[in-house]
Amino acid sequence: MNNLVERLLQGDRRSAAKLITLIENDTPERKDILSQIYPHTGRAHVIGITGSPGAGKSSLVDELTTEIRSEGLKVGIIAVDPTSPFSGGALLGDRIRMQEHATDRGVFIRSMGTRGSLGGLAEATRDAIRVLDAFGCHVILVETVGVGQSELDIMHHAHTTLVVLTPQAGDHIQTIKAGIMEIADIFVINKADLDGTRKMVTDIEAMLDLSPLVDGWRPPVLTTIATDHSGIPELWAAIKKHRAWHKDNRTGSDRERVRRELAEIIQRHLSHQISRQLEKHYDHLVKKVAARQLDPYSAAMEIIKESLKGGLAQ
Amino acid sequence: MNNLVERLLQGDRRSAAKLITLIENDTPERKDILSQIYPHTGRAHVIGITGSPGAGKSSLVDELTTEIRSEGLKVGIIAVDPTSPFSGGALLGDRIRMQEHATDRGVFIRSMGTRGSLGGLAEATRDAIRVLDAFGCHVILVETVGVGQSELDIMHHAHTTLVVLTPQAGDHIQTIKAGIMEIADIFVINKADLDGTRKMVTDIEAMLDLSPLVDGWRPPVLTTIATDHSGIPELWAAIKKHRAWHKDNRTGSDRERVRRELAEIIQRHLSHQISRQLEKHYDHLVKKVAARQLDPYSAAMEIIKESLKGGLAQ
């Protein structure tokens, strides 16, 4: 495993792929791998791409990759599908990007599904981002299929979040409001040759007029037609602008991100301990609850009191 | 609130609706509500309905409801959409069931989305099931939109799980295998007038031949055409058969369910405490991790050691 990390730091692709698999499977080595990699991370700019299904996110990612590659930067792409049990590389087989970018050594592509990610998909994605960061990717694109809760969780790990919408497909302003509004750093109206584009831009701008700015950043609303690369250079410019802004304002959000991660690790660790304790020491309470002689909330509080007295951490 | 619970136990519909909303919003009263309701639960049979989008789950639920109502039993329907921010009743407005069952006092319909369920959608669903159980529903149908991780979590709260598939729509045997195989108590091939139905039944039966039986139950593979009620009486009969089997074999699974719930409550409680502690006492560690002088795993272990010594529960 030490070898794998060393080879990763030297830019070995196969080590990157293997390390991500080890992390996905939540193997015992995971903690050590991440401890070793961590000092070599923090350099990549992570771009999250989310939005309604059918909005053309994949094409957008492909075109954005072409644009970023034209500056000679190394790109990592992580395609996350919380509804799919598959991970690895297979899922992407049918996609344009495989033809365009598969032979490009400056692009690393990985898909992630729920199957391999026993420790939680969002956490596995975060750690896969770290591997690609240490691997030397300058930019990492993280794409999700839709806008469910899992997708929102995953977007927490991005520095710049693009919310991709189309004028059609029921992307009404009401739907956008819920949860998505808050996470967008840049709005992208893709398929902007379709009817309704102008109205959509106006609607979102009107919404933004009413929203408080976070540290002075107002999300721009851009239009693209990914299939013919139209609007992509402007999008990449806007991302770079946000990156610069982010660098000046990141201290607070970095700490917030660290706090969230620490909370997750602690919770995961404690939850293993709790399950073990429940099996070993609290069968009498479990039986009482199952027989409805005791309600689960009261039982839980009793266990917390008892366990922590005994030191749950050991 | 005591009044609400009392009225619920007397069969008051509005109290049921209000209590579910309080639970969804994770109000401080939640714990008390559930403690009070808990002794009055455990009587309803909970049927989970999951499967690929477009498999006709809603129609199936409608027809099953008609069938169950013909025996005079009271039915609760909970439609859960992990991808939707909406909850309440609005979402169901356009559905057939609203026309057919909306005026029937023996049917209670509720939809749940992510918006209102701050404490986790699966947990909110479990507690909504309890409310309808105490309300006097004999059968509770819990329907989800797809088969993602959230849907699987929700199915944990069902006694009998139906996995609904169609011969078309990419429901290949490979897809079915992942995660779904294990949770199905009954397979339903809906839209069974379509080509490929027989092959699908054969494929699933072949798969079942290779799967170990759990306590002697082999999931039957049934065919239905929900839109003309065909196969529905047979499905209801199979559910009743599974219910009888379940009653004889439930002790183990009941305890397993209690253990899972206790673990969830304990985790939720601890996670609140951890977040507070992180804000109050561990800013120096957060800063070190943000500056990459310390990795998150080592920091987390240090916090666990410290916090539990100090008694995290208080």
Image: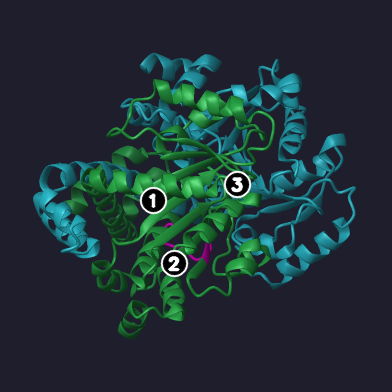
Chain colours: A green, B cyan
Q: Is residue A114 magenta?
A: yes
Image quarter where the C terminus of chain A lies is bottom left
Q: Earlier in the sequence, mark 2 or mark 1?
A: 2
Which residue is the site of mark 2?
Answer: A72
Placement of A215 over or under B295, stated as above or below: above
Tell me which residue sits at (74%, 45%) in the image: B55
Q: Residue most toward the bottom?
A: A3
SS of the residue at dot 2? loop
Q: Chain of mark 2?
A: A
Q: Chain of mark 1?
A: A
SS of the residue at dot 3? loop
Image quarter where the N terminus of chain A lies is bottom left
Q: Is residue A200 visible?
A: yes
Which residue is the site of mark 1?
Answer: A158
Quarter where residue B233 is shown: top right
SS of the residue at dot 1? loop
Task: Report whether mark 3 lies on the same chain as mark 1.
Answer: yes
The range drawn in magenta is A110-120
Q: Nearer the viewer, residue B309 or B282?
A: B282
Left or right: where A63 falls relative to A7: right
Task: Report whether mark 3 lies on the same chain as mark 2.
Answer: yes
| Label 2 close to label 1 by CB (< 8 Å) | no
Frontmost of labels 3 and 1 is 3
- Tell me the tag on residue A230: 3
Q: Earlier in the sequence, mark 3 or mark 2?
A: 2
Quarter where residue B309 is shown: bottom left
The picture places residue B166, in percent across and down from the top left corner, at 78, 51
| Label 3 close to label 1 by CB (< 8 Å) | no
